[in-house]
Image (spheres, grey):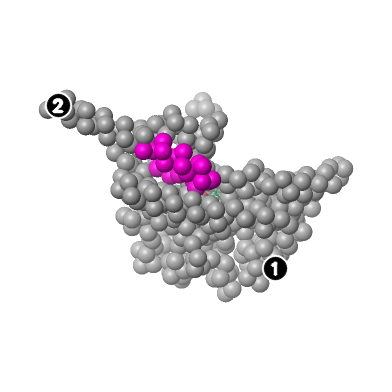
């Protein structure tokens, strides 16, 4: 690639590349471990079948019916004019940057956060500003506002619950950003459905804040990662701006049909959320008893630290058929909450790996002595 006249800001970057390995227990990309229920799969198949004969025509480029369904699902008095959909919330985020970032502009995130932000930012020619969190990964209104005031970014990313740390944002942090930011404020709520009771959504702040965008996805709680459907809620003017940068007919008729059938069965699809939250809380409690550093989670994953060699633990788990995520934080790993059986297998494998590591350490101490 180095011989190609690639844009200089892309030189040396690494593509997004969470390992896609064929393993018995895949807990590395925060997918919903439960397959789509048969009744929902049937409804999706029928909806796609009905579209098939019309595939000679372009799809509705406004995705009007889907956006109406999504607005109804979100509630908060939102209308379809305030909702936009694309191929995954990653495309939504890219469109936001195409419209509000770009050359000469900047975007600020608070690392560690979603690894795609810097890639999407730099891919659109926007300058990436890595903001800082407190040492326990939390954000405080004063420190966040100070960084926003200092950098004057055109776009601010807040991720709530935050990936990879898992904790949701309190609204006073969002309010501090809304009061300070000169540009757009994006709250990525990909994991909102998993938040603990009483966690407020940034959707409650949309009235009166024209530069606030809340993004969501069907990839996580809705168990529809393979369909690629993400969406946002914002002021109608924001949606109008995104129409300027979206590709014509960006959301295929098949995707729109599948998504609408899935939303019609939201109850069945979301019925796994409580079971997943139970496994999330079980992982937190179990890792706590193993004296690991566990971060409180509002998502379907848990970040844990206190590992002497996180890379070795990751590889040891993989050798046991359990794939989790090395998010590049020394001493930490992230594990997705899936089925009870997956949790059991993960915990047993972890005990094996950590026990073996402790055994090695003891053995080498004895050897030295
Ligand atoms: C998984 C995830 C998404 C979802 O991306 P899609 O493109 O909708 O699949 C968005 N934001 C964060 C923080 C995520 O972890």
Instruction: Name which residue lies at 67% across and 58% down.
Output: 267
**Percent of width and height locating residue 2:** 49, 27
Q: Residues within 10 Å of mark 2 (few under 14, many from 20)?
A: few
- Residue 177 visible in the current orientation: no
Instruction: Count how many numbered circles sit on residues in the image.
Output: 2
Mark 1 in CB contact with mark 2 (< 8 angstroms): no
Foreground of the two, 95 or 110: 110
Real-space Cα separation, disc 1 to disc 2, in angstroms? 70 Å
On the image, the x and y values in percent for residue 325 come to: 45, 40
Q: Does 364 sit above or below residue 183?
A: above
**What residue lies at 31% left-to-right and 35% top-to-bottom?**
355
Among all residues in the image, which is located at the extreme left?
369
Look at the image and say whether residue 342 sits in the magenta stretch: yes
Magenta region, residue range:
333-351
Horizontal relation, residue 309 to residue 29: left or right: left
Q: Please say if 161 is above or below 87.
A: below
Q: Position of residue 15 (x, y in %)?
A: 51, 36
Q: Which residue is mark 1?
A: 79
Q: Is residue 348 left or right of residue 35?
A: left
Q: Main SS of the magenta segment?
A: helix
Horizontal side of 4 relative to 177 (left or right) equals right
- SS class, disc 2: helix
Q: Which residue is mark 2?
A: 368
Task: Look at the numbered disc 1 and give the secondary structure of its residue.
Answer: loop
Q: Nearer the viewer, residue 112 or 221?
A: 221
Residue positioned 22% across, 28% down in the render: 363
* Mark in front: 1 vs 2: 2
Q: Is residue 210 magenta?
A: no
* Disc assigned to residue 304: none
Towards the viewer: 258 or 66: 258
Q: Is mark 2 within 8 Å of ligand 1?
A: no
């Amino acid at each position: 690639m180095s011989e190609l006249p690639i844009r200089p800001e892309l030189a040396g970057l690494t593509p997004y590349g969470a390992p896609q390995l064929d393993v018995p227990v895949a807990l590395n990309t925060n997918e919903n471990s439960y397959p789509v229920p048969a009744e929902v799969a049937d409804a999706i198949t029928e909806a796609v079948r009905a579209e098939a004969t019309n595939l000679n025509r372009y799809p509705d480029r406004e995705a009007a019916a889907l956006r109406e369904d999504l607005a109804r699902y979100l509630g908060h008095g939102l209308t379809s004019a305030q909702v936009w959909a694309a191929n995954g919330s990653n495309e939504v985020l890219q469109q936001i940057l195409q419209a509000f970032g770009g050359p000469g502009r900047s975007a600020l995130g608070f690392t560690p956060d979603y690894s795609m932000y810097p890639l999407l930012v730099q891919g659109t020619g926007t300058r990436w500003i890595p903001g800082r969190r407190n040492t326990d990964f939390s954000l405080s209104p004063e420190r966040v506002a100070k960084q926003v005031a200092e950098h004057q970014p055109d776009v601010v990313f807040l991720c709530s619950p935050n990936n990879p740390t898992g904790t949701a944002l309190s609204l006073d942090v969002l309010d501090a950003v809304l009061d300070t930011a000169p540009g757009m404020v994006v709250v990525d709520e990909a994991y909102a459905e998993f938040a603990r009771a009483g966690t407020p959504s940034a959707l409650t702040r949309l009235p009166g804040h024209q530069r606030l965008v809340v993004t969501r996805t069907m990839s996580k709680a809705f168990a529809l990662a393979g369909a690629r459907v993400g969406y946002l809620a914002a002021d109608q003017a924001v949606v109008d701006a995104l129409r300027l940068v979206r590709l014509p007919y960006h959301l295929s008729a098949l995707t729109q049909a599948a998504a609408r059938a899935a939303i019609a069965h939201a109850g069945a699809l979301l019925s796994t959320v409580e079971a997943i939250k139970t496994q999330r809380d079980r992982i937190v409690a179990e890792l706590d008893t193993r004296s690991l550093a566990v971060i409180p989670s509002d998502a379907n994953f848990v970040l844990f630290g206190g590992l002497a060699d996180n890379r070795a633990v990751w590889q040891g788990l993989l050798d046991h058929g359990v794939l989790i995520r090395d998010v590049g934080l020394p001493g930490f790993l992230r594990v997705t909450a899936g089925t009870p059986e997956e949790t059991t297998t993960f915990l047993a494998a972890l005990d094996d790996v950590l026990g073996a590591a402790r055994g090695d350490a003891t053995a080498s101490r004895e050897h030295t002595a």
